[in-house]
Amino acid sequence: MQKITTILFLSTALTLASCGGKDKDPLSAKKAELEKLKKEQTDVSDKVKALEADIAKIDTASDKEQIAKLVGVAAIAPINFVHYIDLQGHVDADNISIITPRLGPGQVKAIYVKKGDMVRKGQLLLKLDDAVVRQQIVAAKQNLEDLKTQLVLAKDLYNRQNNLWKQGIGREVDLITARTKVESLEKQLKGGEEGVKINQEQANGTNVYSDVDGIADEVNVRVGEIFSGSTSNGPQIKIVNTSTLKVVTEVPENYASKVKNGSKVLVILAEMNKTYPTTISFSSKSVNANNRSYTAEGKLPYDGVLRPNQLAQVKIEDYAAANAITVPINTVQTDEKGKFVYVAVKEGAKLLAKKKAIVIGEAYGQLIEVKSGLTAGEQVITEGYQSVYDGQSLRVDIK
């Protein structure tokens, strides 16, 4: 049969070669000639293969001389098949605090934290310049003392005027004036005390405290610089609480019907050889117009090795089938009728290849689900399947 194939192929090649010289464009002619030869070679090979199979079935005498094809097989066993949507994501923190000055920007006089430090809520992080406020406090307190002295004198004068008035001595206008003076000074004293409190609050505002427990993830400020909370380079001090972390990923909008709150997720940090099972706890209701995706998040358990912004592989489960029949995806072939695989079947003392039409389902990794056409226990040909035909004698490669 191989001789027939070679003769047909050479005859066709010589015929086409004799006509190729008439083409005005030699390169195009040769390309066209090559494509035609390839097609004819494929057609002839398929016909030869089909004839060999037919002859093998009819000519039982030659079956004795037929050499069995060496193949590798694998028994079909039902498994729990899962299909995932593979995405990239990153670790993020639920509780991130950007520290800002309570009463506005100020010049840094002292820094009590460095990047990587563990800090507690209420811990002093920075001291801002408070010289002007302190001077205002001193002046306000001095003013209070002056008012207190004036009030003592005014009250003494009022009491004397009141005693004289009770004895019928003096003028009423003098008594009223003395009482008005006392009341005015009392109001000024009260206002001065409030002013001191305000100045003291401003002085306290120059102390910058942490409002959460966590790690100082960013400390981008130096003594003498103005601290405002953030600059064009980002936050000046960022505190991250790593006790509550999450994974964040962007899901293409075409998966909107499959990925939702409660969907199972595997979060894989390959560099650390860590895998965390979780579920989608949040999925955005809006789609990003720039990349046509939406944000999905899943909570992560506490693990001291996890850090915000770590890259992660996010595998979102969108299909699962219990006791599914699967085969290696590379063993599935296609003809004019659809998909098929070859299985090894025992007939008497012989092991023969049988072509089995199948209906496939989802594919993931190296496996593809077979909806119908195969049953558990059948022996799928996994090695050498490319060159076998229906009814061919087989021998199994035992490793």
Image (spheres, helix red, strand yellow):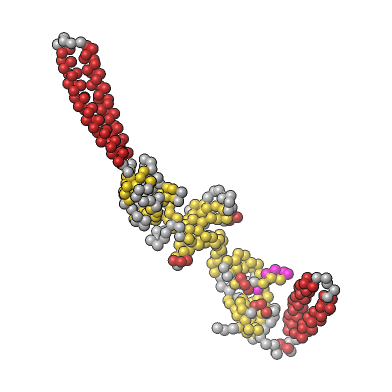
Across and down, in percent, residue 272 comes to 44, 66
At horizontal 70% and vertical 87% (from top left) the residue drawn is 66
The reply to whether residue 85 is visible in this rendering is: yes
How many callouts does the rendering have? Answer: 0
Of 396 and 9, the residue lying toward us: 9
Does 392 lie within the magenta span? no
Image location (x, y in percent) of residue 364 = 57, 66
- At horizontal 83% and vertical 72% (from top left) the residue drawn is 23
| 166 up-or-down from 156: above or below | above
In the displayed structure image, the side of residue 298 where residue 38 appears, left or right:
right
Residue 313 lies, with reference to residue 66, above or below; the image says above
Q: Nearer the viewer, residue 379 or 319?
A: 319
Question: Which of the 4 image quarters holds residue 345?
Answer: bottom right
Q: Residue at x 55, y 64 (%)?
A: 82
Q: Main secondary structure of the magenta part?
A: strand
State which quadrant residue 33 falls in.
Answer: bottom right
Q: Position of residue 138 (x, y in %)?
A: 25, 36
55 sits to left or right of 318: right
At horizontal 42% and vertical 47% (from top left) the residue drawn is 230
Q: Quadrant of the N terminus?
A: bottom right
Question: Which region is colored magenta?
Answer: 336-341
Residue 337 on the magenta segment = yes
